[in-house]
């Protein structure tokens, strides 16, 4: 059976320190996730640049190959 909440229950709910601690823990977790996202984004950009460099090298080598074949 459910009993209605009293004024004291509501006051205890809103002033309970465990809720603030949970909020602090969530904030810390969100901050850790944000750092991970930033780190992975930086790594992704480096990898994309490396892929771009590889693609340019492949294009250059193919052009050289074509030039040698068509001489």
Image (spheres, rainbow, N blue to C red):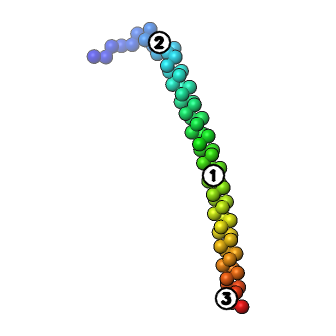
Mark 3 Cα shell of 10 Å, populated few (<14), some (14-19), many (≥20): few
Relative vertical location of residue 19 with respect to residue 27 in this rendering, above or below? above
Foreground pick, 2 / 32: 32
**Residue 12 badge:** 2
Q: Helix, strand or loop at disc 2? A: helix
Task: Name the spot of residue 3 as percent of width and height, x first.
Answer: 33, 13
Viewer-nearest of discs 1 and 2: 1
Mark 1 Cα shell of 10 Å, populated few (<14), some (14-19), many (≥20): few
| Residue that label 3 marks | 69
Mark 2 Cα shell of 10 Å, populated few (<14), some (14-19), many (≥20): few
Q: Helix, strand or loop at disc 3? A: helix
| Residue that label 1 marks | 43
- Which numbered disc flags the more N-terminal residue, 1 or 2? 2
Point 68% across, 71% down: residue: 57
- Which numbered disc flags the more N-terminal residue, 3 or 1? 1
* Residue 33, quarter of picture: top right
Give left or right: position of 14 versus 61: left
């Amino acid at each position: 059976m459910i009993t209605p909440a009293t004024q004291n229950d509501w006051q205890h709910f809103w002033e309970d320190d465990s809720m603030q601690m949970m909020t602090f823990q969530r904030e810390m977790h969100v901050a850790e996730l944000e750092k991970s996202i930033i780190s992975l984004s930086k790594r992704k950009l480096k990898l994309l640049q490396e892929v771009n460099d590889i693609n340019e090298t492949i294009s250059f080598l193919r052009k050289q190959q074509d030039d040698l074949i068509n001489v």
